[in-house]
Image: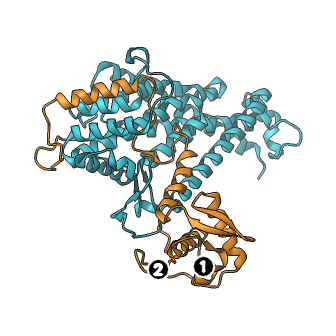
Amino acid sequence: MGVFVYLPLVLPLTALPMARLAEQHLHPRSATRLLAAVGSTLALCSTLCLALLMVVGTAQLPGNPLPDGWSDPEVRAAVPYEEKAGLIAIGVLAAVVTAWCSMLLRHARTRIRAARALPPSAGDGFAGGLTLVPSPHPYAYALPGRRGRDGRIVVSTAMMDCLDAGERRALVAHERAHLAGRHHRYLLVTQLAARANPFLLPLRTAVAYSTERWADEEAAYEVGSRRAVATAVATAALVSHRPPGPAVLPAFATAGPVPRRVAALLDPAPPAGLWPPASTHLALAAVTATVGTAASALSSLNATVTLVGILHAATPL
Amino acid sequence: MNRPTGTDDGSTRDGPRLPRRGQGQLESQVLTVLRSAGGPATAGWVQEHLDGDLAYTTVITILSRLYAKKAVTRTRQGRSYAWTPASDEAGLAALRMRRVLDGEDDREAVLARFVSALSPGDEARLRALLSRAAEDPDDGSGDGRPGSAAPEG
């Protein structure tokens, strides 16, 4: 095992260049899927690594619930025994599991509360999954349903009022795309991954952006006008979110996700294929991320197999 | 996640009537009755006109809850209160929705919102982009006719 068992904890760093470049150069659909897959793999390996460290590090401690054979001298000779790392791993693993549970709970609670807040059934504001809420606050979102059915699109009247007919269609098409593509699953997976290893936080941000872009592209295709979607996004953002503080000149702050979405919509549609890569930077980043993910998976797999083998041999069953 | 409705005013809603009614349904029923009063009404009046066998205390509880949500207003009338609806059912839904959305963290959003918060400088950027969009020759049409002109996404 040696030092390789620590690798999955730091290898998520290799996904960072990928996260940055994928959202700029890849088609958002590919970027979302790729980053979600890479992120969940890295998060799983990192968590597995923590679990291994915990087992190896604490098998010696008096009063641990593990079988006696696991602290056998032979095992200790075969497995580098690191009590400190083991103790730290217990704490970190507990924190990760707690964070996951609280996140899942919050997720479920928000969805249930949002669903309960809506008027129950076919009133006058309900047509094919679209619910119009009379509210002076402009907002719009997609509320996923169970198993891909009865998802709902919620739009406030204030939001509808600030858009013209084409933009309204674009807005609804955008939210439909979220529901049809089950985008909330990608978001949840990357949010959980980011809780498992903080190095994966940029991946979460990248996937959140990519799913929005993905829905934008679907909406543009559906409505037949990239410009309608672009102006819908820009108008909605200007109406609903006033940035706090004094107006800052654009040159002094990095562009947020909304202007980047609008700018991307005013540009031609991105190519859908993954190959050939759009730039050498991207290819390099992809290779780094692939190597990192593969190394992470291999080292955690290797460590697991080794450990399981040794412990299996040492445990009298 | 549509809950079947138990309202029986027969105007806009349909659905099977359930014996067990949720809190939200009770609230909307009480609001419906209160609106039909056409003015301030006492809890006793509401209880009488409610279809069902709700206890007086239950009605008071629901009215207080609605009051806390600013969905009804009340004025003292002798030893009890007279209640007036402040908003209709849809307004109540909007109120509840607002609370859910306010509790949402933009960074860890559960609900995919149409637009996220703007960073400083974004406003100016968006205005520039909007004016650029206005100058550009239209690619489809503003009315969004889906058709052969659709750019491949």
> Circle 1 marks a residue in which chain?
B
Q: Position of residue B74 (x, y in %)?
A: 64, 63
- For this rendering, which residue is in front, A315 or A278? A278
B147 in relation to A238, above or below: below
Colour seen for chain A: cyan
Residues at marks 1 and 2, CA–CA distance in whole angstroms: 17 Å
Residue at image coords 48%, 48%: B111
Query: Which mark is in front, 1 or 2?
Result: 2
> Circle 2 marks a residue in which chain?
B
Is B94 displayed left or right of A83 in the figure?
A: left
Neighbor class of circle 1 (other Cα within 10 Å; few <14, some 14-19, many 20+) is few
Q: Mark 1 sits on what residue?
A: B20
Residue at image coords 27%, 30%: B130
Q: Which chain is orange?
A: B
Q: Where is residue A183 in the image (x, y as percent from the top left)?
A: 41, 47
Quadrant the N terminus of chain A occupies: top right
Identified by mark 1, the residue type is Arg
Is A123 displayed left or right of A223 in the figure?
A: right
The mark found on residue A78 in the picture is: none
Q: Mark 2 sits on what residue?
A: B9
Residue at image coords 29%, 45%: A163
Residue A253 visible to an observer of this rendering: yes
Residue, far left: B148
Name the N-terminal-most of marks 1 and 2: 2
